Amino acid sequence: MSDFFPEEIIEKILLRLPIKSLIKFTAVCKSWLSLIKTSTFVQSHLCTTIDSNNQNDAHLLLLSAYSYPPKECFSYEHHWLRWDSPEFGEYSNLSNPFPFFTYKNKRRDLRVFGTCNGLVCLESFDPDTGDFSPALIWNPSIRKIVMLPTPPACLTYNYRKYTSHGFGYDSHSNDYKVLRVVSRSDDHSDLSRFTTVVQVYSLAKGSWKRLGASVVPVDLQAGGSERPDFVNGCLHMLEVRLIVYYDDDHQEHRKCGGDSFIAYFNLATEVFGEIMIPEALRKDECSISRYGESLALIKEKRYNLDDPANCGCDIWVMKEYGVAESWTFLYSIVMVQATIFGFKRCGEVVLEETNVLRLRRMLSLDPKSGQVKVFGTEYCTYYFMDSFVESIVLLDHGKAISYQGEINSADPKKFIRGSLQ
């Protein structure tokens, strides 16, 4: 084919192909296979896809849920891609590569905690250590996975031990990284005595490293139901300022929580920073979420029989990322209980509503008109949503494993290795 078309023309054509066609074309000839698997081509294809999606307003959202079907003891993972549009139609149902993930003959559930540039990062509960650990990075578009090594042991005493994981992209080094924060509660007044350990996994290097104690903020604590949100090259976590006081009953110093703030971790510099939230909200029960290329702050308002209209949540948005003065109140959502999953490009919010009878349903809500679209699958508990772009990232990774259909074991010998099948 190169005898008829210049190589640069062939490359431009290949860059515009959809992924399924592109994968088929790796079998045309060795030169095409070599070209498509280069890191430069993989990154160029991603940029071309993002530009095309922006021009055609064809964006996707990844939603994940788990279910406990009747008479079943184990949960099942489910993943869907939906159009990021007012119609919110289903684009595809992703085949779960690990319906029964096992390790040392023990059943382990997998949960999504982050996605970026077509990669999905999942964690699993380790019965040996009693905590969660990042397990694998998955590209469902090309059916490839990379198994993560077990993080080095830290804070081995498991009582009141908590973990948080985040996933994102370091554009400076073209590397995907996993942030792992491990905390153990204690009552020491010496704030220089860290109870939080921070570890970072590099996909390019294939290894974990532990950050020095001087880099870890005193107030950084793992745990909670929130996952760090990846925005503008940083992972963001809502934290509480620690205050030390003297407990007369126990005759010792203790730590307690004060004002809330947003801590962020820059994946390129691997340094922490802070973003202040509105003063009026610093002592309220809040959560954060990605809002386009910035952040949203959700103030929770619990249901009260004496004031049933004052429930649900208030939505604040940082209009200019990183500028604390740009926090702006947008609107309130009035319902018994609203759990925010994220925001669509059109301004609609995806949430789970719980009514007074404790019945739950998933909604896509237009805050301007008040119109809602009910969606969801019976027996499923939704827990994750974020923007998604199909890509061929991992195609050039030496340790990526290809698979066909669903995998029922974590035994690497049962995977299809090597070139694409």
Image (cartoon, rainbow, N blue to C red):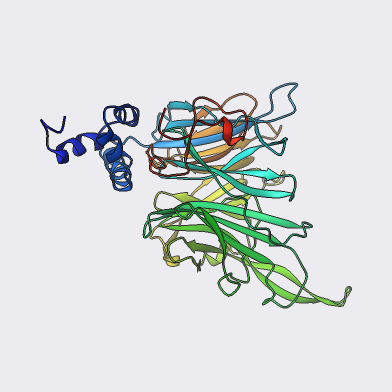
Residue 389 lies, in percent from the top left, at 39, 39
Q: Residue at x 56, y 67 (%)?
A: 211
| Depth order, front residue of 353/197 | 197
Q: How many numbered marks, from 0 up?
A: 0
Residue extending furthest right?
A: 249
Residue extending furthest left?
A: 4
Residue 334 visible to the viewer: no
Residue 148 visible to the viewer: yes
Q: Residue at x 57, y 48 (%)?
A: 313
Residue 350 lies, in percent from the top left, at 50, 38
Q: Residue at x 46, y 60 (%)?
A: 267
| Depth order, front residue of 46/309 | 46
Quadrant (top left, top right, bottom left, bottom right) of the N terminus? top left
296 in relation to 356, above or below:
below
| Depth order, front residue of 144/172 | 144
Locate residue 143 relative to residue 240 in the image: left or right. Answer: left
Q: Give the quadrant of residue 344.
A: top left
Residue 379 lies, in percent from the top left, at 65, 26
Quadrant (top left, top right, bottom left, bottom right) of the C terminus? top left
